[in-house]
Amino acid sequence: MDRGTVGSTQKGRLHVEVRGEGSTAVVTPVGELDHATADLLRDPLESCIDEGLTRLVVDCSRLEFCDSTGLNVLLGARLKAEAQGGGVHLAGMRPVVARVFEITGADAVFTVHATLEAALAD
């Protein structure tokens, strides 16, 4: 498997790492995803899709907070990826982040995995 780092970006409370795992892009947001930091996740997700990597795994294991703006970024990426025959998988959500998805019902529209390894194996 190709495990090279494709890129990373950081601003204040959020750092985003992107790496390739074969034909899948693994996107790892680290920190707090909210209105002020949403573009730091949106941009690499959209870049992956634009480059033809439409199977995205978002490793949420290091995501400490996600508000509605962050949720909308992920929903938007899901729609774009699915329009190109791909999808967005979420992995390793912490309880505080998982709760946002449960409350809004967004957990029903994503494929959610307990771990990154499980998402990559799917």
Image: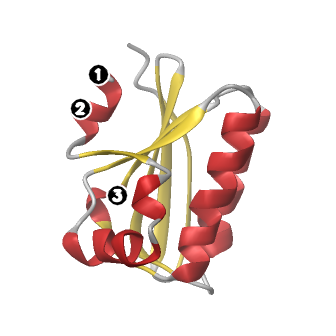
Image coordinates for residue 18, horizontal then vertical, percent: 51, 44
Above or below 72: residue 2:
above
Circle 1 Cα neighbour tier, 10 Å, few/some/many (<14 / 14–19 / ≥20):
few
Judging depth in this view, the residue of 31 and 76 nearest the camera is 76
Circle 3 Cα neighbour tier, 10 Å, few/some/many (<14 / 14–19 / ≥20):
many
Above or below 91: residue 21:
above
Q: Which mark is residue 121?
A: 1
Amino acid of disc 3: Cys
Question: For this view, does 39 lie left or right of residue 60?
Answer: right
Q: In this figure, which residue is indicated by the disc labeled 3?
A: 60
Distance (Cα) linking label 1 and label 2: 5 Å
Above or below 18: residue 1:
above
For the C terminus, the image quarter is top left
Amino acid of disc 2: Ala
Question: For this view, does 99 lie left or right of residue 77?
Answer: left
Q: Secondary structure at mark 1?
A: helix
Distance (Cα) linking label 1 and label 3: 16 Å
Image coordinates for residue 28, horizontal then vertical, percent: 42, 52
* Residue at 23% in and 32% down: 117
* Residue at 63% in and 69% down: 72
* Residue at 29% in and 63% down: 62
Q: In this figure, which residue is indicated by the disc labeled 2?
A: 118
